[in-house]
Structures are given as structure tokens and as C-alpha cells.
Amino acid sequence: MAVKAATLFIALCLPVLADFAAGQRAFKNGDYATALKEFLPLARDGDAVAQYNLGLMYANGDGVPRDYNEAVKWFHAAAEQGEAEAQFNLGAAYHKGAGAPRDYKEAVKWFRLAAEQGDAEAQFNLGVMYHDGQGVPQNHQEAVRWFRLAAEQGNASAQFNLGLMHYDGHGVRQDYEEAAKWFRLAAEQGNAEAQFTLARQYAHGEGVPQDYKEAVKWYRLAAEQGDADAQVNLGILYVIGHGVPQDYVQAHTWFNLAAATGDADGAKARDKVAREMTPEQIADAQRRAREWKPTTSR
């Protein structure tokens, strides 16, 4: 009897698995009409992953009109069954007030459930909420705990925030070396804020040996992503010739790029260095700024 029951169970489940796989293939190929056709009956029958995927389709407007209320409905159904990514998305919906009333306590509830299953994004968001006191009493030690769990999974934003906690001594003992460790991990993943902060540590010798060449390296990576603070600091190093040969044209270019974002320090520095430049040098710097294109993080 056991063998026959098992055989019957498998026979009944195979079409469901096939339908789900067909829906996944269709979704991946951009055939959202077919994906919807396959996912909808499965979702209505209680399949948590199909419910989650259907929620994504409504959240993103893939093959259906974008409808955050409908997305939340399906995320909630999947989240109640323990689907971690649905729990995370439901938490985000409550946090943003998209498809559900803004409710930080509900956001914390769902982020926590996903975080406890190891979802790094949920761990990071829960850390932010403890840091800011949203939906929970502010608690920097709890923030550090959740940032660390996400950071150890490679989440760059969590690595940066954990670095900040060590840098400022919030929730942990102030430790510039530990801060630099986490900033570096995030910076190597292309996080511009981490690149800027690591560069500043090298420029000032905080937790790392003072090294202007390293400072230039990390300021440049952040500046090339459009970080105005990094652009100003990189320009300053070109003015004084630390870590790079003194070059007013390069300095003016970076100051000009920062000024274009509305950065007042960039505008002041640009105008100051311009007084030391020839009209030809200024024209060259302005051309470089016009032709500059930002890079994107990896």
C-alpha cells in the first residue's frame, strides 16, 4: 500500500511541477502571458512559489497592469506559508506603503521572518530599522547583529553599514581597522560610499597606513560613479599633488563635475583653481567634464 500511495502521489504531482517549470521558462523568456496562465491556477491552489512569482508580476507590471495591491495579496499568501522572498517583499511593501498602508511594525515583522531564514536583504533592512528606530526601539547593537549577518553573506550595503558602525562606535567599540575591513569588502563590490570612505581612511591614516596613492585609487572609483564628495576630494589631491602629479586641469575637471550636481564645495574649489590656470587649460578641463560619462558599479 505504501508503494502504491507513493506512486499515486507522484503521478498527481508531476503535472503541477511541469506547469510550474513551464511558467518559469515562459517568465524567463519574457512570455508573460504564458507565465500568467501557468502560475495563476497554481497560486490559487496554494503553491507558495507560484504565489510569490505572481506577486512579482503584479509588482513589476510584467504581463499584467502594475498593481501593488494585487502584488501584496499574493506576497501575503506566499509569506504566510513561509516563503522567505515573499516575506521580504511584503515587508518592503509595508515599509514603503506600496499596496499596503505604511506600517513599520508590520514591515519589521515580515523582515524578521525572512531574516531568520537567512535572507540577506531582509537582514540588512532589519538592521536599518533597528538603527533608525522604525517599528522597533532604536538599538544599535541589534542593528550591528543584523548588519553582520547580511555582511557575512556578501551584502555590500550591509558591509558598508557595518563599517560605519565600527567607524563611529555605534553598537560596538570604535575600531577603525575593523571599519576599513568592511569598507574594503563593500568597496570591492563597487559600493561608491564604501569606496569614498575607505579612500578617506587612507588619506588620513585611520585604521590603515596613510597612503595617498590608495586614497586616489578609491576616490577615483567612487568619483567615476558620480559621487560628488569623492570628485571634490580627488580634485584636491590633484591640486596639492598627493598620490598623483599636480594637475590643475584634472582638478578643475573633477571639481566641475561635482559642481554640476549642485555641490557648493565643488563650485568653490573649481573657481579657486581656475584663477591659477590659463584660458586654454580651463577650456580643456571644461571639455573633459562635458565628455565624461559615469561608470556603474559591478
Image (cartoon, rainbow, N blue to C red):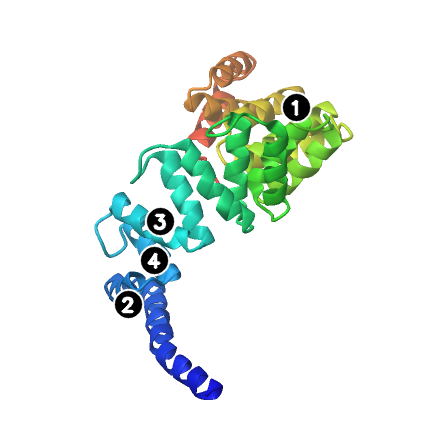
Dot 4 amino acid type: Gln
Left or right: 166 with respect to 30? right
Is residue 255 at all visible to an observer of this figure? yes
Query: Label 2 belongs to which residue?
Result: 38
Depth check: 172 or 41 in front?
41
| Distance in Å between CA atoms under marks 4 and 3 | 9 Å
Q: Position of residue 36 (x, y in %)?
A: 26, 62
Other-residue count near label 2 (Cα within 10 Å), few / some / many at <14 / 14–19 / ≥20: many
Point out the tag, 1 or 4, that comes first from the N-terminus: 4
Check whether the beta carbons of the residues at disc 4 and disc 2 lie within 8 A of each other: no
Depth check: 215 or 54 in front?
54
Mark nearest the camera among 1 and 4 is: 4
Corner quadrant of residue 52: bottom left
SS label for mark 3: helix
SS label for mark 4: helix
Point out the tag, 4 or 2, that comes first from the N-terminus: 2
Query: Label 1 belongs to which residue?
Result: 168
Say which residue appears at 24% left-offset and 66% top-offset.
Answer: 37
Query: Label 3 belongs to which residue?
Result: 76
Q: Residue furthest right?
A: 209
Q: Position of residue 68 (x, y in %)?
A: 28, 44
Mark nearest the camera among 3 and 2 is: 3
Check whether the beta carbons of the residues at disc 1 and disc 4 lie within 8 A of each other: no
Mark nearest the camera among 2 and 1 is: 2
**Is 149 situated above or below 267?**
below
Point out the tag, 1 or 3, that comes first from the N-terminus: 3
